[in-house]
């Protein structure tokens, strides 16, 4: 029995020695394989250019007594959107000292309307709510 | 819309607030601001949709929360017009240039690089062929153009500055699995960025005409619109990879399409079966002013690709069903037919259409749709109704008629194109609302 136990421990020690020897060799092999598997490739990414910064216009102290244009971009092409009319009604009810003017931009929702911008500026528009885009 | 706010703020010094749905707001506050306007426009994020709602629902909208600030919408609007500017909102001048992308990526394993490409949004989420220097050099043998030749500067969404070279396109061609001989086609395709994107479900179609079809083995016959032809599949895939890497399209960042379109998987990339055209029917590129011996890429854009389903029948001529099916098109005033050679043969020999133009004339005269149906399409109402209100015909007249009046919605036969392709195993066709470009030279990229 004692001889059997001794034999078992000898085997165990031999196994540990073998494993200790083999493991570093295997690790070295893995490391070598990993380095060999590394690939260098070209980069498909394109560099973006950041736009030049443009500041916003100064804000109003308050809307009291001011003229605010609500501009419909003509998103649907058929005229004023009810949601903007509802917005005008909200101002009339909740901020009656604000004068609101609802305007429909001409052309499609992507077309510019320089005449309208000029009109807003020359008629004393203090601020503009512009919408909508979906 | 940001353009309009920009004019009012910058040119007239008038404070503005822009209203949009939350996806557009996200784009406006991020990519559009950084790369396009440079102006930190103040937005209020509205619920969506804006239309077709009852009064009490609209009131509820305005009582809801701004998607940007989390405040009640009307309070947010007032704040956007009155809250003093932050230092960031007052900033002027050119920001420092971003560090240029290095020509090579850091070395890594195949698996990690495949993962990186997916994580960066450079792929269609199928594995790509990694662009090693050797593969890219081999690809570049497909063109006489120098690798560092600049193709275009304003390649980004809405024309933002994203300059790219021939080498970048060769990289994408490798990724897509292209052969070097495909490269001139892919370069021609890349020269057309930015491709059209929309929140709606538009798509592209890529047509190749001329000798290059045969030279690179493009399919114009059996299964032409399917996924089983190498050159067609790879070139169609390359378009998607160009869209992502060169144009910089990222869903939810630089683009916001609700449903997108399954045609985008392969971009309906096909060659015309020029050899199968009936006598008198000319190839698309020749009708666009190119010579028959020119190799030409024509890019189409549209929404609907309507299948005739079964073959042509004895008791109803094909042009009649084509006419009927135009009713569901996107009201752009354009149509493109893709038909099997056997249908072209029938139209020419049994129905008497001696040319593609004759068929286009007939469809233009006979295709009709109720005015209400036409105007119910927001492509038509958004773009054409304002023109009609300005007095432009035929839209002005179409706005005046009762909704059930039939209008001839393909008024210009020049905008009706026919492509002949297919395997003659069934007399089938598609009718689409795709609008054709004029065609660009592939030979210029050889």
Image: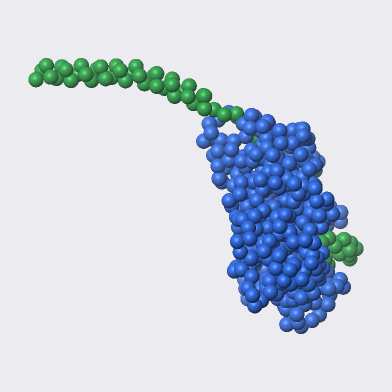
Look at the image and name its color scheme: by chain
Q: Nearer the viewer, residue B209 or B442?
A: B209
B301 to the left or right of A57: left
**Residue at the spot 61% in from the left edge and 56% down from the top edge:** B222
Q: Nearer the viewer, residue B267 or A9?
A: B267
Q: Where is residue B317 drawn, in percent x and y?
A: 69, 74
Residue B405 lies, with reference to residue B99, above or below; the image says: below
**Residue at the spot 78% in from the left edge and 72% down from the top edge:** B362
Residue B161 lies, with reference to residue B19, above or below; the image says: above
Q: Where is residue B74 drawn, in percent x and y?
A: 68, 65
**Location of residue B393 by image quarter:** bottom right
**Residue at the spot 60% in from the left edge and 61% down from the top edge:** B425
Residue A127 lies, with reference to residue B55, above or below; the image says: above
Q: Colour of chain B?
A: blue
Q: Nearer the viewer, residue B66 or B235?
A: B235
Q: Where is residue B131 drawn, in percent x and y?
A: 62, 34
**Location of residue B127 by image quarter:** top right
Residue found at the very far right of the displayed protein: A122
B205 to the left or right of B226: right
Residue B192 in sight here:
no
**Residue at the spot 61% in from the left edge and 53% down from the top edge:** B265
Q: Spot the green chain and give its letter.
A: A
State which quarter of the image contains the C terminus of chain B. top right
Q: Where is residue B76 drawn, in percent x and y?
A: 68, 60
Task: Count up the numbered dots.
Answer: 0
Residue B367 lies, with reference to residue A40, above or below; the image says: below
Q: Nearer the viewer, residue B82 or B384?
A: B384
**Location of residue A66 by image quarter:** bottom right
Residue B56 in sight here:
yes
State which quarter of the image contains the N terminus of chain B. bottom right
């Amino acid at each position: 029995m004692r001889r059997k136990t001794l034999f078992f421990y000898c085997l165990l020690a031999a196994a540990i020695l073998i494993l200790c020897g083999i493991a570093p060799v295997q690790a070295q092999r893995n490391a070598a394989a990993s380095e060999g598997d590394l690939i260098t490739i070209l980069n498909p990414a394109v560099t973006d250019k950041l736009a030049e910064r443009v500041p916003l216009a100064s804000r109003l102290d308050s809307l009291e007594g001011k003229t605010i244009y609500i501009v419909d971009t003509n998103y649907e092409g058929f005229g004023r959107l009810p949601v903007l009319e509802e917005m005008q009604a909200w101002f009339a009810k909740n901020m009656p000292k604000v004068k609101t003017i609802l305007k429909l931009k001409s052309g499609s929702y992507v077309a510019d309307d320089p005449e309208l911008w000029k009109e807003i500026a020359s008629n004393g528009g203090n601020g503009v709510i512009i919408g909508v885009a979906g | 819309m940001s353009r309009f706010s920009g004019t009012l703020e910058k040119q007239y010094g008038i404070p503005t607030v822009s209203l949009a749905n939350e996806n557009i707001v996200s784009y406006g506050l991020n990519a559009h601001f950084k790369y396009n306007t440079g102006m930190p426009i103040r937005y209020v994020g509205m619920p969506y949709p804006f239309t077709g709602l009852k009064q009490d629902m609209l009131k509820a909208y305005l009582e809801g929360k701004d998607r940007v600030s989390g405040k009640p919408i009307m309070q947010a609007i007032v704040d956007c017009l009155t809250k003093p500017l932050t230092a960031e909102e007052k900033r002027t001048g050119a920001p420092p240039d971003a560090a240029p992308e290095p020509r090579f990526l850091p070395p890594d394993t195949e698996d990690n690089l495949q993962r990186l490409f997916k994580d960066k949004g450079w792929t269609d989420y199928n594995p790509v062929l990694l662009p090693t220097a050797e593969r890219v050099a081999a690809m570049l043998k497909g063109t006489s153009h120098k690798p560092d030749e600049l193709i275009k500067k304003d390649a980004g969404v809405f024309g933002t500055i994203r300059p790219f070279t021939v080498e970048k396109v060769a990289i994408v061609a490798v990724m897509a699995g292209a052969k070097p001989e495909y490269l001139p086609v892919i370069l021609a395709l890349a020269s057309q960025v930015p491709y059209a994107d929309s929140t709606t479900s538009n798509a592209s179609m890529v047509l190749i005409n001329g000798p290059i079809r045969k030279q690179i083995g493009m399919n114009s016959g059996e299964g032409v619109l399917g996924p089983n032809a190498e050159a067609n599949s790879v070139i169609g895939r390359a378009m998607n990879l160009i869209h992502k890497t060169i144009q910089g399209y990222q869903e939810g960042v630089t683009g916001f399409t609700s449903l997108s379109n399954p045609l985008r998987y392969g971009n309906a990339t096909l060659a015309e079966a020029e050899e199968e055209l009936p006598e008198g029917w000319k190839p698309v590129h020749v009708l666009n002013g190119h010579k028959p011996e020119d190799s030409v890429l024509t890019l189409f854009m549209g929404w609907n690709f309507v299948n005739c389903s079964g073959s042509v029948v004895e008791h109803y001529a094909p042009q009649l069903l084509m006419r009927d099916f135009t009713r569901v098109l996107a009201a752009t005033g354009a149509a493109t037919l893709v038909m099997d050679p056997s249908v072209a043969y029938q139209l020419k020999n049994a129905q008497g259409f001696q040319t593609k133009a004759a068929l286009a004339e007939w469809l233009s005269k006979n295709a009709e749709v109720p005015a209400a149906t036409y105007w119910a399409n927001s492509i038509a109402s958004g773009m054409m109704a304002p023109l009609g209100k300005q007095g432009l015909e035929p839209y002005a007249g179409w706005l005046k008629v009762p909704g059930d009046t039939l209008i001839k919605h393909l008024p210009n036969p020049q905008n009706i194109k026919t492509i002949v392709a297919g395997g003659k195993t069934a007399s089938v066709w598609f009718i689409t609302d795709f609008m054709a470009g004029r065609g660009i030279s592939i030979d210029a990229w050889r």
